[in-house]
Image (cartoon, grey):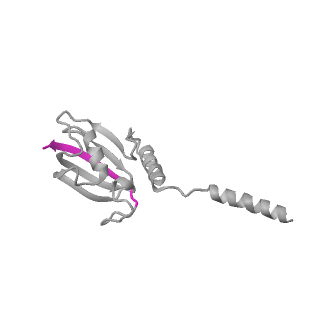
Amino acid sequence: MNKLFIALTLVALSLTACKKKESQADIDEKIIQEYISSHNLNAIATGSGLHYAIDQPGTGASCNAYSDVKVKYSGYLTDGTLFDESTTGITINLQQVIKGWTEGIPYFKEGGKGMLLIPSALGYGSQSTGSIPANSVLIFNVELVDVL
């Protein structure tokens, strides 16, 4: 009886030990993939968790992660809730924004338009900010107006 009890206990422990908690990155990737599928997007993954879709690549100057740029944008949660936008454009340095923008905006040339699908780690992470809940995937429609 003791050997059977010990064997069953060891089996139960090994089964529960094998179950891993899903990481936030895995959760975000599932959310992004569902969004891409449900919106029929042709998005490209960068390897960091960021995905982008280019509607118009633009024909002007390129920028990099250290550039000053002017960007028009609309920011949404995956449920469609608008949390921020600038229809006239904001001028910013790409080192002073969320990591998803620092990485994503340089995929566009001046005049380029498209979408950034940003996992929470490249957005605001586990911190809620304004109307953006913690661990939120962010969707941005962007237009790179000018590279300064």
Q: Where, quadrant-wise, is the N terminus in this rendering? A: bottom right
* Image location of residue 90, percent across then percent down: 17, 53
Residue in the image at 22% along x and 35% along y: 58
Q: Is residue 125 left or right of residue 62?
A: right
Along the line of sight, which residue is nearer the eye, 95 or 128? 95
The image quadrant of residue 55 is top left
Q: Is any atom of residue 132 visible in this view?
A: yes
* Image location of residue 44, percent across then percent down: 38, 39
Residue in the image at 37% along x and 46% along y: 50
Taking the magenta stretch, the answer to whether it contains residue 65 is no
Prevailing secondary structure of the magenta residues: strand
Q: Is residue 90 left or right of residue 39?
A: left
Q: Is any atom of residue 137 visible in this view?
A: no
- State the residue lying farthest toward the top: 59
Q: Is residue 52 left or right of residue 88?
A: right
* Image location of residue 17, percent across then percent down: 63, 58
- State the residue lying farthest toward the right: 1
The image quadrant of residue 64 is top left
User: With respect to residue 133, does 121 lie above or below?
Assistant: above
Along the line of sight, which residue is nearer the eye, 123 or 114? 123
Q: Where, quadrant-wise, is the C terminus in this rendering? A: top left
Q: Which residues are magenta?
A: 135-148
* Image location of residue 105, percent across then percent down: 26, 44
Question: Total of numbered circles in the picture?
Answer: 0
